């Protein structure tokens, strides 16, 4: 995730300066028309399309339409370099929806939270979620769960029977796979949540025990994964963006915890679940 986050930068997803939709300084009517029609987070004001001395700021109430709230001069804090890594830029939007971008000392573009619906950021999320899935399967297999049978996997008989049929079919055609590799993502998550050696390790790392409900809230990424995988809009409004901030942070945290567990010497003892 970090490598991908450094590969993609703000300039890959921003609106370039020539495409910025702006209004003349003081033209509140034109700005209001743009916001009403296109629901932009901000409308810059400029006399020449090169420098942007002011912006019309907007808000989007939960049960209302987006509208202009203030007009103000731009400041240094409204700008970020367009070379900023995308992963780093993501966390700059925790309390605001937009930035003008700089290349050298000149405005090069505009970026809003909406840019994080782009394929570039989706690729990074996909890599992170795939890493969670890979490490989760490896952890279970490392502890002797789901190698050549359903042994050690605490799932319902109905689920295990479906997986068993798929496992046997795939193994006859290709060979070499593990039983745990045939679990769906949400079943991998469920198996991991019920795997007590992992839970004890995680509780030691966190310094506290998590209830099953807390574990699900922090580390069940199934719905988010489905949205990433199926190309759905991840952040339709800024409120969704803010709510997803902690989710995406937890993906990185879980990867770190899983990596640490898998780095331990294997005990060689069969698991108790």
Image: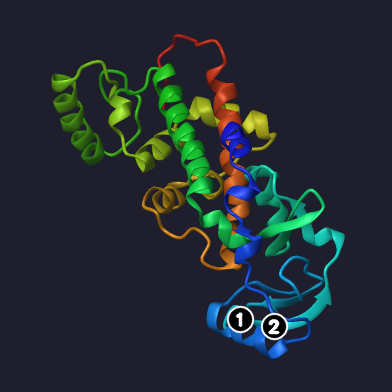
The answer to whether mark 2 and mark 1 are in CB contact below 8 A is yes
**With 126 as the anchor, is 16 left or right in this view?**
right
- Residue, disc 1: 35
Relative to 195, say whether 269 is above or below.
above
Find residue 49 and report its horizontal and vertical position in percent. Answer: 71, 69
- Residue at the bottom extreme of this rendering: 29
Find residue 134 and report its horizontal and vertical position in percent. Answer: 43, 29
Relative to 270, say whether 159 is above or below.
below
- Residue sitting at x 14%, y 27%: 169
Distance, label 2 to label 1, CA atoms, is 7 Å
- Between residues 272 and 255, which one lies in front from this camera angle? 255
Which disc number belongs to residue 210?
Answer: none
- Residue, disc 2: 68
The answer to which image quadrant residue 60 occupies is: bottom right
* Crowdedness near tag 1: few (<14), some (14–19) or many (≥20) residues, C-alpha within 10 Å: many
- Residue sitting at x 51%, y 37%: 128
């Amino acid at each position: 995730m970090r490598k991908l986050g450094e590969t993609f930068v703000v300039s890959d997803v921003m609106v370039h300066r020539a495409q910025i939709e702006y209004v003349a300084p003081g033209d509140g009517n034109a700005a209001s028309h743009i916001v009403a029609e296109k629901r932009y987070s901000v409308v810059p004001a400029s006399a020449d399309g090169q420098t942007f001395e002011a912006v019309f700021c907007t808000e989007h109430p939960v049960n209302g339409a987006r509208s202009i709230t203030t007009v103000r001069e731009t400041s240094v804090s409204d700008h970020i370099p367009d070379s900023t890594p995308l992963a780093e830029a993501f966390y700059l939007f925790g309390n605001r929806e937009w930035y003008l971008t700089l290349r050298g000392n000149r405005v090069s573009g505009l970026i809003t939270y909406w840019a994080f619906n782009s394929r570039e950021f989706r690729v990074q999320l996909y890599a992170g979620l795939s890493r969670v899935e890979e490490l989760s399967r490896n952890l279970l297999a490392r502890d002797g769960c789901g190698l050549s049978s359903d042994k050690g996997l605490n799932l319902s008989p109905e689920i295990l029977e479906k997986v068993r049929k798929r496992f046997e079919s795939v193994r006859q055609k290709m060979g070499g796979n593990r039983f745990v590799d045939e679990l769906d993502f949400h079943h991998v998550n469920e198996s991991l949540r019920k795997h007590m050696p992992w839970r004890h390790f995680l509780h030691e790392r966190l310094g506290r025990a998590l209830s099953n409900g807390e574990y699900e809230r922090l580390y069940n990424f199934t719905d988010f994964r489905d949205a990433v995988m199926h190309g759905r809009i991840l952040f339709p409004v800024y409120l969704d963006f803010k709510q997803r901030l902690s989710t995406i942070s937890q993906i990185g945290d879980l990867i770190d915890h899983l990596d640490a567990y898998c780095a331990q010497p294997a005990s060689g003892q069969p698991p108790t679940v």
